[in-house]
Image (cartoon, grey):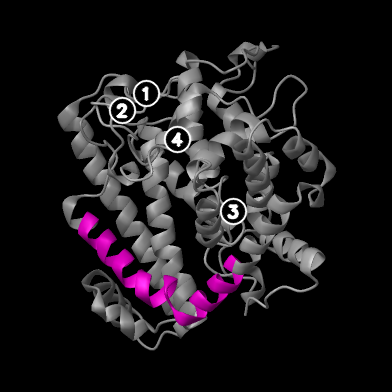
């Protein structure tokens, strides 16, 4: 018997507070409903097929690519975040397609050389709107991707755009003031301008799916930065004893697997960290959801606290892990040396291109030349550099100056 296409969607029972693709608030440009995919599946697929997503393979997480093939890049980090977000969302009865889409999109706005590139571009764009990777991700999916005949950007659903902007929580207080993160700099102008066009309800939380993607990011980088740092020799397994949570895991592994080779010990540490963080989030989130009893995704957004979160005890562990990694990894002298060299590359590129936009490819040069203000001209320069992979940025630096730092 022939089955009509309209009936091919799997009938999945989700919690009443899950985002419902059939009730999506729509897209910037209305499109016909797909007979084979939900709205959130289409969002995920468009993100995967985007140019910005592919570029993540050659953008730094912490280590630049030539330091080793097995360290995380932005892409491998993103894939790990997607896996954890799916695990959380399924355990909580959420729409795992939306959670995965947001996990896969959460780092699209990152520049070459990770946070180093972001810091340089933010400083260079002071007085012209600054630079924020979340705002840049929004620009990418609504404007900078040029793939479709009918529109710029990816034309994602409202729920995907809202989750991308607010996955880390509200940007404004209920009184309309910037939250502490943006108290000094203000909410990024790109987000405020888009919000005037399509309100994203910046004073509320995002969906539970977006919250799952956000905490999946924390879990992933805590665990894999420990893994990469240990394997790179930035710190030793013995150094982990300074964090009670990690000392207990190391002790457990030594008891169950005495004389285990170091490489396997590191993997056992990583997998136990991920498992315990995920299980804690599931238990704590189930507790919060049972207590609040939200009956819709709107109830989740209007809550006074996130519904997907660590327990208080695990939140302390999360802080302890970050406090350990900051000096031992992110500010390690080897990492800082490369960061300083990478910063000089981005500074050189911005200085050269902003002084002479014709040095950029024709398409970018023409957009910059036709800009009606200095801020918009520099924004085109910033967009061009932000989209670069690490190796392309190095190649451009060599093209413009004849050399580039070694990044070693």
| Frontmost residue, 35 versus 238 | 238
User: Which numbered disc, 1 or 4, marks the residue that appears first in the sequence?
Assistant: 4
> Which element type, helix, strand or loop, lies under badge 3?
loop
Q: Name the residue under label 3.
A: 111
In whole angstroms, how far apart are the C-alphas of marks 1 and 4?
A: 10 Å
**How busy is the neighbourhood of tag 2: few (under 14 within 10 Å), some, or many (20 plus)?**
many
Magenta segment, principal secondary structure? helix
Quarter of the image that includes the N terminus: top right
Residue range in magenta is 315-343
Kindly tell me whether residue 96 is visible in this rendering. no
CB under 8 Å between callouts 1 and 3? no
Compared to residue 237, the image places residue 326 above or below, namely above
The residue at which mark 1 appears reads as 201
Question: Could you tell me which residue is drawn at 50 percent across and 18 percent down?
Answer: 197
Q: Residue 305 location, x and y as percent?
A: 22, 35
Say whether disc 3 or disc 4 marks the residue closer to the N-terminus: 3
User: Magenta includes 113?
Assistant: no
Q: Quadrant of the C terminus?
A: bottom right
Residue 141 % position (x, y): 60, 33
Image coordinates for residue 90, horizontal then vertical, percent: 40, 37
Q: Quadrant of residue 318?
A: bottom left
Q: Which residue corresponds to mark 2? A: 204
SS class of the residue under badge 4? helix
Q: In this view, does 48 lie to the left or right of 363?
A: left
Q: Residue at x 67, y 35 (%)?
A: 144
Label 4 environment density (alpha carbons within 10 Å; few <14, some 14–19, many ≥20): many
Give the residue pinned by disc 4.
165
Element type where label 2 sits in the image = loop
Other residues around mark 3 within 10 Å, as few (<14) / some (14–19) / many (≥20):
many
């Amino acid at each position: 018997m022939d089955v009509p296409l309209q009936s091919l969607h799997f009938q999945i029972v989700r919690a009443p507070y899950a985002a419902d693709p059939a009730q999506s608030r729509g897209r910037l440009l209305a499109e016909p409903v797909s007979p084979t995919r939900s709205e959130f599946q289409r969002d995920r697929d468009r993100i995967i097929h985007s140019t910005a997503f592919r570029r993540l393979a050659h953008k730094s997480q912490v280590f630049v690519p030539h330091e080793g093939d097995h360290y995380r890049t932005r892409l491998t980090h993103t894939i790990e975040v997607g896996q954890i977000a799916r695990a959380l969302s399924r355990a909580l009865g959420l729409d795992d397609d939306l959670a995965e889409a947001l996990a896969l999109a959460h780092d699209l706005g990152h520049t070459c050389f990770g946070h180093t590139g972001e810091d340089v571009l933010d400083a260079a764009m002071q007085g012209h709107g600054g630079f924020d990777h979340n705002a840049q991700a929004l620009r990418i999916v609504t404007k900078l991707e040029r793939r479709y005949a009918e529109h710029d950007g990816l034309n994602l659903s409202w729920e995907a755009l809202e989750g991308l902007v607010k996955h880390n929580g509200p940007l404004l207080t209920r009184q309309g003031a910037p939250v502490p993160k943006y108290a000094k700099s203000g909410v990024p102008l790109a987000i405020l301008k888009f919000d005037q066009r399509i309100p994203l309800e910046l004073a509320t939380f995002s969906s539970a799916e977006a919250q799952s993607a956000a905490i999946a990011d924390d879990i992933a980088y805590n665990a894999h930065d420990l893994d990469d740092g240990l394997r790179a020799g930035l710190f030793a397994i013995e150094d982990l004893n300074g964090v009670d949570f990690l000392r207990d895991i190391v002790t457990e592994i030594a008891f169950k697997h005495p004389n285990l080779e170091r490489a396997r010990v590191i993997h056992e540490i990583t997998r136990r960290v991920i498992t315990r963080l995920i299980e804690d989030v599931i238990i704590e989130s189930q507790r919060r959801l049972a207590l609040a009893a939200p009956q819709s995704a709107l109830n989740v957004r209007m809550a006074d606290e996130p519904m997907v979160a660590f327990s208080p005890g695990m939140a302390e562990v999360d802080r302890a892990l970050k406090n350990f990694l900051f000096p031992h990894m992110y500010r390690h002298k080897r990492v800082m040396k490369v960061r300083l060299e990478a910063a000089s590359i981005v500074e050189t590129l911005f200085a050269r291109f902003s002084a002479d936009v014709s040095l950029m490819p024709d398409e970018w040069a023409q957009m910059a030349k036709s800009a009606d203000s200095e801020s918009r001209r520099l924004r085109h320069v910033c967009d061009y550099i932000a989209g670069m992979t690490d190796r392309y940025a190095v190649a451009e630096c060599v093209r413009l100056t004849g050399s580039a730092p070694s990044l070693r």
